[in-house]
Amino acid sequence: MKENYRSAKRYAKAVFDFAQEKKILETVLEELRAVRHLIAESTVLQDFLRSPAITHQKRRKVLEHLFKERLNRLTYNFILFLGEKGKLFLLRKACEVFEDMYLAAKNILRVQLISAQPLEHSQVKTIGERLKSKLNKDVILSLEKDERLLGGFTIKINDTVYDFSLITQLERFRQNVVFA
């Protein structure tokens, strides 16, 4: 799995650098977001990208039909290149990595905010502003709900989790009482 990530990162970096050089970074970003969304929504496309049984010519025709008239040349050629190398199964991950590179270049951080109950707009805004101030980066919050938290919330930034949930506080209290 890590090998797939490293390969996807290598391909995404090459496209990122070229798009930056050609000054079409935002265009490629939006197109790769759309491609990633399309892959996520279509199990047929996922199977097509992974299937070793599809001939190279057939795969190229399908890719041409799907993308040639809808994407700029760089994005389209990137997808064809992955097809030529037999690496289309990496396309979705490469799209994600490209977006991560873009956000890092723009000093933007993606943050997951997971709460037991839906938060009010003002609460989300306040949390976002505090994170922006503390991290010195712009923040994109994605909201999720997890009733197992009972109350409170957790903040996930990359691989780091800040846990302000009621379930964690109760567990800490229980451990203090039992082991005190």
Image (spheres, rainbow, N blue to C red):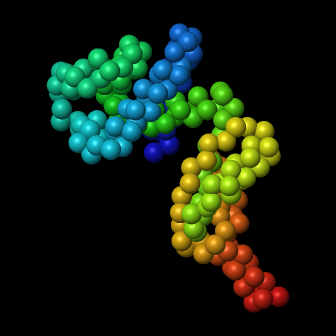
How many marks do you count on the picture?
0
Position of 69 with respect to 96 (left or right) is left
Position of the N terminus, as image quadrant, is top left
Position of 70 with respect to 124 (left or right) is left
Could you say where residue 54 lies in the image, as x and y percent from the top left?
18, 32
Indicate the quadrant where residue 150 lies. Answer: bottom right
Indicate the quadrant where residue 149 lies. Answer: bottom right
Could you say where residue 171 lies in the image, as x and y percent from the top left?
69, 79
Residue at image point 38% right, 32% down: 35
Could you say where residue 167 lies in the image, as x and y percent from the top left?
64, 76
Position of 84 with respect to 122 (left or right) is left
Could you say where residue 46 lies in the image, as x and y percent from the top left?
29, 41
Residue at image point 53% right, 66% down: 146
From the viewer's perspective, is residue 159 above or below residue 20?
below
Query: In this orientation, which residue lies closer to the viewer: 27 or 63?
Result: 27
Position of 75 with respect to 105 (left or right) is left
From the viewer's perspective, is residue 166 above or below residue 18?
below
Query: In this orientation, which residue lies closer to the viewer: 13 or 136?
Result: 136
